[in-house]
Amino acid sequence: MRIALYNHTSEVSGAEINLLLTAAYMPQTSFVLYAPEGELLERARSQGMETVALPGYSARLSMNPIRLVKGAAGMALAGWRFASMVNKARPDVIHANSVRAGIMASMFRWYHRIPLAWHLHDMPPKGIIGGLIRLLAAGTTQALIAISQPVLEGMKTRALENRIHLVHNGAVLKEQDELARRYSKKELRGELQTPMESGVLVIVGQITPWKRQEDAIQALHALLLDNRDLYLWIVGEPKFRSENEVYFERLKLLVSILHMEDRVRFTGFREDIDEICNAADMLLLCSENEPFGRVIIEAMAKGTPVVATDGGGVSDIIEPGISGLLYPATDTKALAASIGSVLDDRKLRTTLSVNGRKRIEAFFSIEGAAEKLEHVYEDIARTGQRTGVNVKPVERARGIAK
C-alpha cells in the first residue's frame, strides 16, 4: 500500500514528530511525504522516506475579509499543485497531516478522486469557519483521524460521525538501564548547570501563550518561597507566529522580575526529550486546552511523574491520582500544591511512576498507534467508502494498578 503524506509546513512540531515516528513503525506501508523544503523533509530523508518538495505556503485562518480571500487563493494554488502531483503518482490514500493541509488537499479531490484522510491534531475551530470546515470534510474525506476524544467530539457532526477514527499518539517503550539512566542524568544536569541533589521540574513544548509556561514559572516562585530546592527547565522555542516571540520575551522578563534567573533554564528546542524526562523529577503541562499532550506519554513511558491541566485530551491519558495528577488550568496555587504533594510523598511518586508506564504499555504504545492507523488506511483504500473502524476510546476512569 502506498500513502501520500501531505504537510503544509516545513516546521517540525508535535504533529510532524508523530507523523514520522508512526510511519517508521509501519514497514509494510510505503510512504511519500509532500511538504515544503526544510527541516521536516530533511528528517524524513534521514529515516529513508521518499519525499517531494512543494512550494511553501503559510496557511492562516482569519475572519478578516481581505485576508480570508487572499488566504483562500493561496490555499487553492497550493492545493492545485499538490493535486496535480498526486494525480500522476496515484497513491492508494492521501493522509493530510492537519486541518489546514486537509483543506488544501480537499479543494481538488474531484480532480484525482483518491481516498483522503485528515489527521486532526488540534481542537477544531468553532463558529462560521468551523462549520465551513466540517462541510468541506463531509463532502471530500473518507476518514478523519482524531488524536483524542475531545478532538473527535469537537469535529463530529451527523454527516461525519461514521468516519471519525480515534487513534491516540504512541510512545516508544524501551527497557530502562538504570546505570545508563544515572549517567545520562548526570550529563544533562551538568550541561544545564543544575545540581544533582536539587529537584527539577520540566515543561516541554512550543513557547506560545496557550501553553502557559508562565504558570510553571509562578508555581516555581511559590515553591521557592516555601524553601524548596528546585529548578525549572523550559524546553521549546517560539515558532509559527510573531506573538509567540513576544510571549517568549514576556517569560524571560517574568523570570527577571521574580529574581529567578539562577533557577530557570530556557533550553530552546531539544531532540533528547527522553533524556530530559529521565533527568527531571517531574513533568508539568500547563496548557489551557491541550488536544492530546504527546510529551505526557513520553514522560510516563520513562516513569517520570506528571502534573497536568485537567482538560482537553489530557483526560484521555491520565487517571487522576493513579497515573498522574491533574489541576484546573490557570490555577497556579493548585499547580504548586500538586507539585508539592508529589515531592513530599515518596509512595505517591512511586505509584505515579509505575502506573504511568503501565498505562502507556496498555494503551499508548507506538506499535498500537501504527496498527490502528494502518487499519484506517486499509479500510478506505479497499472500499473507498466513508466507513469507520470502530476504534474505541480509552476508558478514562479505570485504574491499571493501584
Image: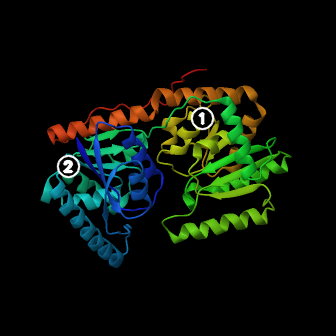
Identify residue for label 1: 302
Farthest residue toward the right?
227
Asked which secondary structure carries label 2, the reply is loop
Which of the 4 quarters of the picture holds residue 35? bottom left
Asked whether the beta carbons under mark 1 and mark 2 sit within 8 Å of each other, the answer is: no
**Residue 401, percent across and down?**
58, 21
User: Is residue 132 something one can see in this rendering?
Assistant: no
Left or right, 396 with respect to 267, comes to left
User: Is residue 251 something one can see in this rendering?
Assistant: yes
Work out how far the residue at label 1 is from the one at label 2, CA to CA, in angstroms.
37 Å
**Residue 26, percent across and down?**
34, 37
Q: Residue at x 59, y 33 (%)?
A: 320
Figure label count: 2
On-image quarter of the C terminus: top right
On-image quarter of the N terminus: top left
Farthest residue toward the bottom?
66
On screen, 11 above or below 337? Answer: below
Q: Earlier in the sequence, mark 1 or mark 2?
A: 2
Using a 10 Å C-alpha cutoff, classify the residue at mark 2 as few (fewer than 14 neighbours), some (14 to 19) or many (20 or more). some
**Residue 136, percent across and down?**
24, 57
Which of the 4 quarters of the picture holds residue 147? top left
Name the amino acid type tagged 2: Pro
Name the amino acid type tagged 1: Lys
Q: Residue at x 78, y 34 (%)?
A: 344
Q: Residue at x 54, y 31 (%)?
A: 174
Using a 10 Å C-alpha cutoff, classify the residue at mark 1 as few (fewer than 14 neighbours), some (14 to 19) or many (20 or more). many
Asked which secondary structure carries label 1, the reply is loop
Identify residue for label 2: 91
Of residues 397 and 293, which is closer to you in this image?
A: 293
